[in-house]
Amino acid sequence: MENNFICTWARNASPLMQAYHANEWGQVSHDDRYMFEMLSLEGYQAGLSWNTILNKRAAFKESFANFEVAKVAQMTDADVEKLMQNPAILRHRGKLKATITNAQAFMQVQAEFGSFDKYIWQFVNGRQINDHIRIPEEIHAQTPLSAKISADLKQRGFKFVGPVIIYSFMQAIGLINDHEIECMYNPG
């Protein structure tokens, strides 16, 4: 018999949220460009809904050179001023500047570790954490591990990387699998 069960939070979500749930959330990624995109978008999400961010994702990609980290790292205050005029994205000066700062810090991590992938996956010894979620209430907002990664990123100069943002980032890149056990998209 075919399993049609999906995570409770995704059942009545928008088509964009359902597609994100099915194709990205909790799926292991080792792609530095994608990780930078997710780290950036999770920072923009702070205080807003993820659906809002997904609706603006294409505009963010266009505004930030498809999140090519080297290109974003070279952006200037003049670029920020241009972005502040773009109604298709979230025009939060602090978050826009943080995206550029984070690109520069991201490149420093890449230089030190060989890739951001090697850096971030060391926190879980290269293996996805599977939380074996039975009910939605078991999904965390943050954990001691997200706090540890957050602190390390902040020490490296990253901005908008608090423990809650980092926990969502961990879910986005598959460091953590928080799909409900019965979900047909559960990779674990």
Image (cartoon, helix red, strand yellow):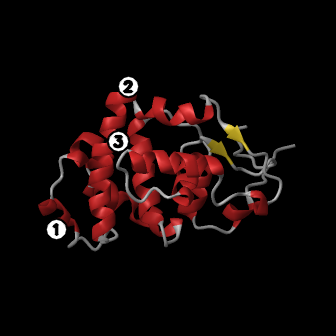
Dot 2 falls on a residue whose secondary structure is loop
The amino acid type found where label 1 is placed reads Glu
Q: CA distance from mark 3 to mark 1?
A: 22 Å
Q: CA distance from mark 2 to mark 1?
A: 33 Å
Dot 3 falls on a residue whose secondary structure is helix
Compared to residue 43, the image places residue 87 above or below, namely below
Q: Position of residue 131 (x, y in %)?
A: 75, 46
Q: Position of residue 29 (x, y in %)?
A: 52, 36
- Seen as rendered, the residue at the extreme left is 78
The residue singled out by tag 1 in the image is 81
Q: CA distance from mark 3 to mark 2?
A: 11 Å
- Mark whose residue sits in front, 3 or 1: 3
Q: Residue at x 39, y 54 (%)?
A: 40
The residue singled out by tag 3 in the image is 106
Q: How many C-alpha atoms fall within 10 Å of the one at disc 1: few (<14), some, or many (≥20)?
A: some
- Mark whose residue sits in front, 2 or 1: 2
The residue singled out by tag 2 in the image is 114
Earlier residue among tags 3 and 1: 1
* 78 sits left or right of 61 in the view: left
- Examine the rendering and report whether any part of residue 19 can be seen: yes
Dot 1 falls on a residue whose secondary structure is helix
